[in-house]
Amino acid sequence: MTREPDDVQVLHVDEVEPVEVVPGIVRRRLPATEWARGWMYDFAPGTEWPEDDVHDGEERYYVISGEFVDRGRRLGPGSYVVFAPGSTHRPRTETGARMLGISIMTR
């Protein structure tokens, strides 16, 4: 990651160390602020998030590649999903997929 002026952070997501959440799902935590945090998830084919994901604040994700099945919907590349505070979901994939997410922090 490079730091430019104090108000900008720039990085290439594939340079962020991946951490295994469960077998077949890895997370890259992206720079956070007091207002939001970002992350990148890579799901291997046939994987599912290990539990219901409960949101304290608003959560958003963008499908970069592959296909997720979430709340009964098939979400391919270009899909942008917004979950309200208090909502839950449990994404899975048959094909393998990558998503970029943003969690809006509660105050």
Image (tube, helix red, strand yellow):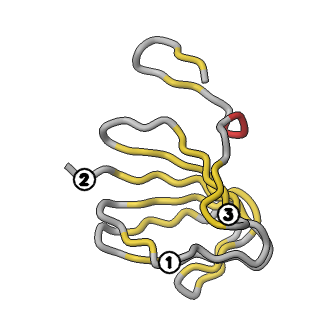
Q: Is residue 88 above or below residue 36?
A: below
Label 2 – label 3 distance at C-alpha: 26 Å
Q: Residue at x 51, y 24 (%)?
A: 9
Q: From this viewpoint, which residue is outermost toward the left?
A: 107
Residue 40: give x, y in percent of width and height: 61, 51
Horizontal side of 98 relative to 89 (left or right) equals right
Q: Earlier in the sequence, mark 2 or mark 1?
A: 1
Amino acid type shown at disc 1: Glu
Q: Which mark is residue 51?
A: 1
On the image, which quarter does residue 42 sit in? Answer: bottom right
Q: Nearer the viewer, residue 62 or 11?
A: 11
Q: Which residue has dot 2 on it?
A: 106
Residue designated by label 3: 25
Label 1 neighbourhood size at 10 Å, few (<14), some (14-19), many (20+)? Answer: few
Residue 70: x and y in percent read: 57, 79
Question: How busy is the neighbourhood of tag 3: few (under 14 within 10 Å), some, or many (20 plus)?
Answer: many
Give whichever of discs 2 and 3 has the lower sequence position: 3
Q: Residue at x 29, y 64 (%)?
A: 56
**Nearer-the-camera pick, 15 or 6:** 15
Q: Amino acid at mark 3?
A: Ile
> The N terminus is located in which quarter?
top right
